[in-house]
């Protein structure tokens, strides 16, 4: 099943003391990681400072942003591991969507 590319969505919560420059730095580092692991970024949405439903590492607020990207499933664990090493990321969640592209298959009638 080599050649399968899936679409993923990552939601990140950054420490509330992060300013816009820090958020942009984490976004660019994540985008570089996606590229380094053979994927491509489709969309980045910055949701700004949000109140959290429950405290995460003693923080009641966080800076949220969301990234949609495409990547081979085998490369995802390396990307997640690299992102989790960032001190400013309080929480990272990656979910997969639909199969974006695959090896050519015959068209059905």
Image (spheres, rainbow, N blue to C red):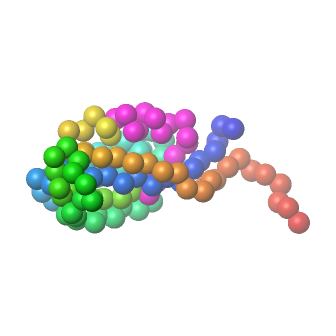
Q: State whether residue 25 appears in this view.
A: no
Q: Is residue 73 covered in magenta?
A: yes
Q: Residue at x 18, y 58 (%)?
A: 61
Residue 99 position within the rendered picture, expressed as x and y whole percent measured from the top left: 62, 53
Residue at 16%, 51% (x, y): give it: 59
Q: Is residue 36 above or below residue 19?
A: above
Q: Is residue 3 left or right of residue 64?
A: right
Image side of residue 33 versus residue 101, left or right: left
Res. 100 image quadrant: bottom right
Q: From which residue to which does the magenta span run?
A: 68-82
Which of the 4 image quadrants contains residue 84? top left
Of residues 75 and 58, the one nearer the viewer is 58
Mainly helix, strand or loop, the magenta region?
Answer: helix
In the visual, does 73 lie left or right of 101?
left
Quarter of the figure that contains the C terminus: bottom right
Would residue 35 be visible to someone looking at this image? yes
Residue closest to the eye, 67 or 51: 51
Image quadrant in which the N terminus is located: top right
């Amino acid at each position: 099943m080599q050649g399968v590319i899936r679409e993923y969505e990552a939601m990140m919560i950054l420490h509330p003391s992060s300013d816009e420059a820090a958020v942009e730095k984490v976004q660019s580092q994540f985008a570089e990681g996606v590229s380094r692991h053979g994927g491509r970024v489709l969309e980045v949405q910055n949701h700004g400072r949000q109140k959290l439903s429950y405290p995460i590492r003693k923080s009641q607020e966080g800076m949220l942003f969301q990234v949609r990207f495409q990547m081979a499933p085998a490369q995802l664990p390396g990307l997640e591991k690299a992102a989790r090493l960032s001190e400013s990321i309080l929480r990272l969640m990656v979910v997969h969507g639909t199969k974006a592209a695959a090896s050519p298959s015959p068209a059905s009638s």
